[in-house]
Image: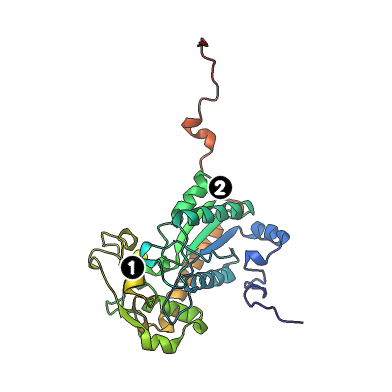
Amino acid sequence: MSKPLSERFGRVVLNRFGKKIYLDQMSMREIEERVRECDIVILPVGSTEAHGPFAAVGEDTIIGVSIAERVAYETGVTVAPPIFYGSHPSHHYGLRGTIPVKATTLIEYVSDVIRWLANAGFKKIIVLNSHGQEYVLPIAKDIAIIEKGVHALILVTSWWMWVQDLLRKAGTGEEIAPGVKLEKPFIHADEVETSVLWYVAPDLVDVETLKKEGNWGVVRIIPGKWVNAAGNVFPDKPFNWYDVSHAPELYYYPKGFVGWASKADPKKGEILVETAIKRMIEFIEWLKKTYPPGKIPRTWIDVEDFEYTKPKEWVEPPEIVKE
């Protein structure tokens, strides 16, 4: 029997129960069977953007899908086809390999995908972000419910939100695991992010180039005392990273990365990724137990219950004046 041309799209990927993980590999009948067993779906939303001369431009999507696949393998949830293009803050624009879409476009796109995932029977939808657009995706959630009539439990999260406590140890000298420390705060295509890609997809990191060219530093328009780093893991800062217009990468970081990526190590990535997976599995098992297939808390308001739709009866005006 011949091999599939694509290892990802042509090879069936199964969970530990022997069932398919990816929605795009299922038939209509298999989808019907799946939602009766488990109606939780993970929708990975990544990006295509420059991550330096040493890492793949699909890094964000690859990280998100890799985590989603592992979680699905253990729990039996479904993974929807990922969204490969994302919304970008202004300072990301212009680098070769970065393909931004407008925030409003992404919001409409994601909310439409949510709508039709719910139509397929998936009533718990986890939007798993793996790119700096966490300020955009919750709007898609609300648009889906308010404007598109979706009746589902929709949850938006980012992979790094599951390891905030570990990321806060960066630069403090504290270990995230025995013998493992993060030296610099999480930024972009840096020590943290490159470590994670190196762990989940080692063939996509050019280690030789990383060691030679992986130092750049950080240009700050406003000192870090007041502005959060990527992931917003430092809650004592008055500005989150997306609240401030930053130095454009095209001029200040033309190599496509920020900080000290040369400090990356796959062991650091392993600790972050495996901890995130473990914690996500715990949550999903709780979700499965608390809300069985077809059962969800009420998260929507029926249009007829809004006051602006009332009254339901009316009368003709007492006199019709002809002019």
Residue 169 x/y as whole percent: 31, 74
Residue 136 vertical position relative to residue 69 in the rendered view, above or below: above
Q: Identity of the amino acid at label 2?
A: Val
Q: Which residue is mark 2?
A: 150
Give whichever of discs 1 and 2 has the lower sequence position.
Answer: 2
Q: Residue furthest front?
A: 323
**Camera-nearest residue between 93 and 263:** 93
Measuring 73% from the left and 59% from the top, which residue is drawn there?
29
Measuring 56% from the left and 47% from the top, which residue is drawn there?
150
* Neighbour tally class for label 1: few under 14, some 14-19, many 20 plus, Cα within 10 Å: some
Numbered-mark total: 2
Q: Which residue is mark 1?
A: 248
The quarter holding residue 134 reads bottom left
The local secondary structure at tag 2 comes to: loop
**Camera-nearest residue between 131 and 66:** 131
* Neighbour tally class for label 2: few under 14, some 14-19, many 20 plus, Cα within 10 Å: many
Q: Identity of the amino acid at label 1?
A: Pro
The local secondary structure at tag 1 comes to: loop
Q: Mark 2 and mark 1 in contact (Cβ < 8 Å)? A: no
Residue 270 vertical position relative to residue 106 in the rendered view, above or below: below
Residue 220 x/y as whole percent: 26, 69
